[in-house]
Image (tube, grey):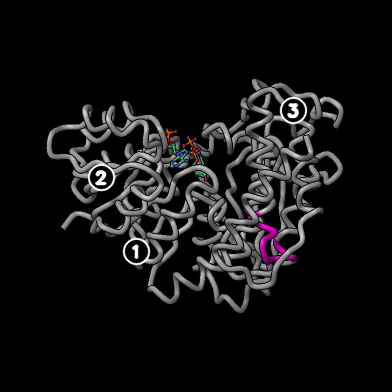
Amino acid sequence: MPKRVLILGATGSIGRSALEVAAALADEIRIVGLTAGSDAASLAELARRFSVPAVAIADENAFDQLRRAVPAGTRVLAGAEGLVELVQTTEADFVLAAIVGAAGLPATLAAVEQGRVVGLANKESLVMAGALLMPLAVARGATLIPVDSEHSAIFQALHAGRREDVRRVILTASGGPFRSWPAERIAAATLAEALRHPTWNMGPKITIDSATMVNKALEIIEAHWLFGLPPEQIDVLIHPESIVHSLVEFQDGSLIAQLGTPDMKTPIQYALTYPRRVPGIADRLDWRQVGCLRFELPDPARFPALELGYAAARRGGCSGAVFNAANEAAVTHFRNGRIPFGRIVRLAEQVLGRHVDVAQPGLADLLAADRWAREEVERCL
Ligand code: NDP
């Protein structure tokens, strides 16, 4: 029987790559639901192409357009609650969480509550609410399979030994477009420059996060929750070629890495077919073309975001939610031309510094912290 797959964030970079993978594995994958934020035309087109029985769109104003554009008989839901309802009422064997930002949390949470196998690309939901999502997954029998390439690499490398024998994990980072730029030039980088990632082709928010290295900071927190590791056992290493996707170091000094081309279709497919490995459509690594692989330590002076990631992971509580929300708000302001590039991380740092935390926050506390951080960014401007 084909695996029934629901894709949250189907119109995005990860969502579309997942649909390409699904099309290549049409015998074993059936798409049972798709969602988008506001792009009704693309969602309807994907629903038609993959004969999808149910769709949901977050923007309620796009409901009529979507309803008119999908084939008769397609179930159509709208609003943030519509996305959650789709997750709750769709019989799915696998849910791909690929919405961008904190907006992905409610639907991801719903998938975990349903005890689904969840392919997690939406790192922000874990950064925000890892303290709730991880125990909930255990309680509901849900399985989280990382889709982020670094975490997929670590997940795969962990199969080489016992958890208690792990010494540390090493997240690799391309270093982004400004890896070798001086601080003054980074501070004044334009939007076009920030969107020009040297190795990965991704959606705009994560591309900007890669340029500030906030993406790696979020990944530190993501790894902390996914693998139950304290921040001091999570290292970051710059690797400009993006071939070694991350490493696990065991107690005996052995380092186990996962390598491949920088193509998200590989970790997406691995999550979809896990634990099987089947021929895929991603480009294969050609060793004749690879040449040399470089590794460098990150420069905390030019990329202060990394330390913020460690600080938020160490503090726990609502710190992840605050850091994530402040960054999201700052990135939006940068994209709208309201602040210079250099202000993004400074704003996140300022807001994180002003936050007064609560111990053992519940969902309401985390959502309140997210709101507060966004308002605090406005107050700082
Ligand atoms: P994109 O911006 O390309 O796509 C985002 C998706 O989320 C779209 O389907 C979009 O719909 C939808 N969306 C946007 N806002 C909302 C909202 N308020 N409510 C519901 N849905 C919404 O992002 P990416 O695919 O690049 O990234 C998705 C996630 O995957 C992120 O968390 C990112 O960090 C993570 N990730 C991405 C990688 C990549 O290579 N792209 C690599 C590793 C992780 P619409 O099209 O209608 O706006």
Residue 97 spot, x, y in % from top left: 42, 50
Frontmost residue, 117 versus 170: 117
Is residue 315 one of those drawn in magenta?
yes
**Image quadrant where residue 189 sits:** top right
What residue is drawn where x is 69% and y is 48%? 373
Q: Amino acid at mark 2?
A: Leu
Report the Cα–Cα distance between label 2 and label 3: 44 Å
What residue is drawn where x is 64% and y is 45%? 215
Residue 268 spot, x, y in % from top left: 41, 48
Residue 322 spot, x, y in % from top left: 68, 53
Q: Nearer the viewer, mark 2 or mark 3?
A: 3
Frontmost residue, 294 versus 101: 101
Label 3 or label 1, whichever comes before in sequence order: 1
Report the Cα–Cα distance between label 3 and label 1: 40 Å
Question: Would residue 136 appear left or right of 334 to someone viewing this image?
Answer: left
Question: Would residue 254 appear left or right of 154 to someone viewing this image?
Answer: right
In the picture of the structure, the residue carrying the numbered disc 3 is 339
In the picture of the structure, the residue carrying the numbered disc 2 is 25
User: Mark 3 and 1 residues: CB-CB less than 8 Å, in contact?
Assistant: no
Label 2 or label 3, whichever comes before in sequence order: 2
> Which region shows up in magenta?
313-321
Q: Nearer the viewer, mark 2 or mark 1?
A: 1
What residue is drawn where x is 61% and y is 79%? 164
In the picture of the structure, the residue carrying the numbered disc 1 is 116
Q: Amino acid at mark 1?
A: Arg
Q: Amino acid at mark 3?
A: Ile
